[in-house]
Amino acid sequence: MSTNYTIWRMRMKELLGIHEVWDVVDPSLDDAKKNNIVKVLFFQSIQEDLVLLIGNLKTRKEMRKVIKTLNLGADRVKDARLQTLFTEFENLKMSDNGTIDEYAANLSSIASKSATLGEVMSEHKLVKKFLTSLPGQFVHIMVALEQVLDLKGTGFEDVIGRLKAYA
């Protein structure tokens, strides 16, 4: 397993979906074949010490809960991680020699991590942060975009594309 639970979870969701076993959550469902497929896929994707911890569990839901608890920890840890992400988000600015794509990727990464922890950032918040933290060389483009677009209804990717077109 990757040391990053978020990445591992995304990969497992796709892997389980391909094998049509993502729905194996309900312990009242008695589908031994699907549960066995999930177990095998989990065992192949995690470290040996985790295999020992989840080896006797019966359902995917139980296994995932143990893995999630070990990796994300209690709510206090989750809240601390969210606070760190929010601080990182607030302090992030595009450097004068950085690229639009790099900066957009950094913002998207923070938004994805936040969503995985249960806090989804709105498109408007991403757009606002993106435009207000650009270096001075983009001010004239930013002003033009603000005059032409309804920024509350414009998507993050759309703003990035428009900025790149004029930059």
Image: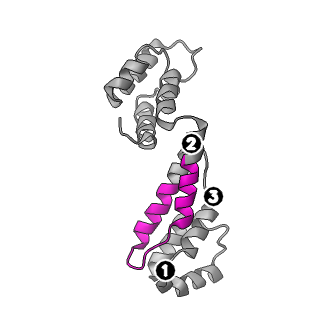
The residue under label 3 is which amino acid type? Ser
* Number of residues whose C-alpha sits closer than 10 Å to that of mark 1, classed few (under 14), some (14–19) or many (20 or more): some
In front: mark 1 or mark 3?
1
Magenta stretch, main secondary structure, is helix
Residue 65 position, x and y percent, is 52, 27
Q: Position of residue 103 (x, y in %)?
A: 44, 68
Give how far apart the Cα atoms at labels 2 and 3 are: 20 Å
Q: Which residues are magenta?
A: 81-110
The amino acid on which the numbered mark 1 sits, given as a three-letter code, is Pro
Residue lying at 40% horizontally and 67% vertically, measured from the top left: 102
Residue at 47%, 85% (x, y): give it.
137
Q: Nearer the viewer, mark 1 or mark 2?
A: 2
**105 left or right, relative to 75:** left
- Per the image, the residue denoted by label 3 is 122
Instruction: Give the quadrant of the C terminus.
Output: bottom left
> Which residue position holds label 2?
78
Q: Is residue 134 above or below residue 157?
A: below
The residue lying toward the viewer, choosing from 14 and 87, is 87
**What's the residue at 33%, 29% (across, down)?**
47
Q: Please, which colouring scheme is shown?
A: one colour
Q: Of the residues shown, which amino acid type is indicated by label 2?
A: Lys
The residue identified by callout 1 is: 135
Would you say residue 98 is visible in this rendering?
yes
